[in-house]
Image (tube, rainbow, N blue to C red):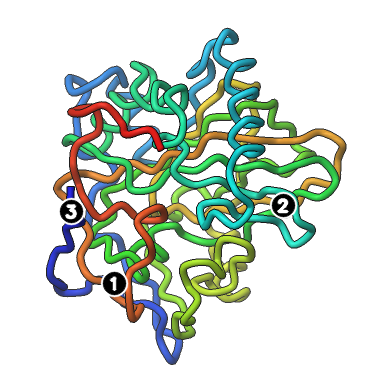
Amino acid sequence: MSAVTMPRVHDPYPTRLGHAVAPIPRSEPTVWGGPHDGPLSAATLDAYAQAGYMIRPGTLGANWLPPLRQELERIGAELDRDDPRVIHEPGGSIRSVFEPHLISDLVAEVVGLETVIPIARQILGSEVYIHQARINFMPGFTGTGFYWHSDFETWHAEDGMPAMRAVSCSIALTDNFPYNGPLMVMPGSHQVFYPCVGATPDDHHTSSLVRQETGVPDQDTLTKAAAEYGIDQLTGAAGTAIWFDSNLLHGSGSNITPLPRSNIFLVFNSTENALADPFAAARPRPEYLAARSAEPFGLHPPAVR
């Protein structure tokens, strides 16, 4: 199917500016569906809407974990080092592999599980498609973190995502401890959009995948946000899923322990929120970073490459 790009629309969330501007209140709801639209109760949906994230233990049963870990090793070993979907740490180890659901039938099965895609549909109140998917590796001793940022800021500026109608699901394949670089979030920060200063660089499709420097709030803004919202550290056993809103401020520290950390990271976007032209970049990022065809997941079998 050929890529579809919607025409540019009015920008309610200007960013990548030449000067600082005040934060912008969120226009959209966090939860678009109701308790009858999926497996989550009204109380769970309300808690997610307030915090901007939720933790779902047991999203993957123990029987899934060994074959998925083997699959990650296979994917990392078989893909060519020069494949653009493979992102490396500065030291050379693999940091991320994009489009794993198109490379692996097993990963595609995870997306379709009853513990995964029905939740995405319920939160977004519509059919969904995968905007982006990747495997993240954080090896022991050398795994580097991700600086504080809102994913929506990047997806809006560089991919043309019009509205905050996307949700991320990070499924742990290893135990997440407080000391091996787990995800940190500022609960409630998803209700405010923080415009960022600085133009999008020409190499924006690769630069932020190794080191997040563009599209990040300044330290004064982050200090005020942390004082207002606090910081939660998200830990859990392998098989646990962390769901979080596209606009939630989040980041992670480096892993200096011997304990590796890996996850399957899935971004679901509403089919009613198809990408437009980038709002703050000269050209869109490649398809493996931002799918431009909003075909609902599950209507056709994934094409294995």
Badge 3 or badge 1: first in the primary sequence: 3
Q: Amino acid at mark 2?
A: Gly
Q: Quadrant of residue 280?
A: bottom left
Which residue is painted at 48% across and 85% down in the image? 198
Q: Which residue is mark 1?
A: 278
Q: Quadrant of the C terminus?
A: top left
Above or below, comparing residue 156 to residue 92 in the picture: below
The answer to whether residue 178 is visible is: yes
Badge 2 or badge 3: first in the primary sequence: 3
> Disc 3, disc 1: CB below 8 Å?
no
Label 1 residue SS = loop
Q: Amino acid at mark 3?
A: Ser
Distance between mark 2 and mark 1 Cα atoms = 29 Å
Q: Residues within 10 Å of mark 3 (few under 14, many from 20)?
A: few
Q: Which residue is mark 2?
A: 253
Which mark is nearer the camera, 2 or 3?
Answer: 3
Q: Which residue is mark 3?
A: 2
Q: Amino acid at mark 1?
A: Pro
Q: Quadrant of residue 158?
A: bottom left
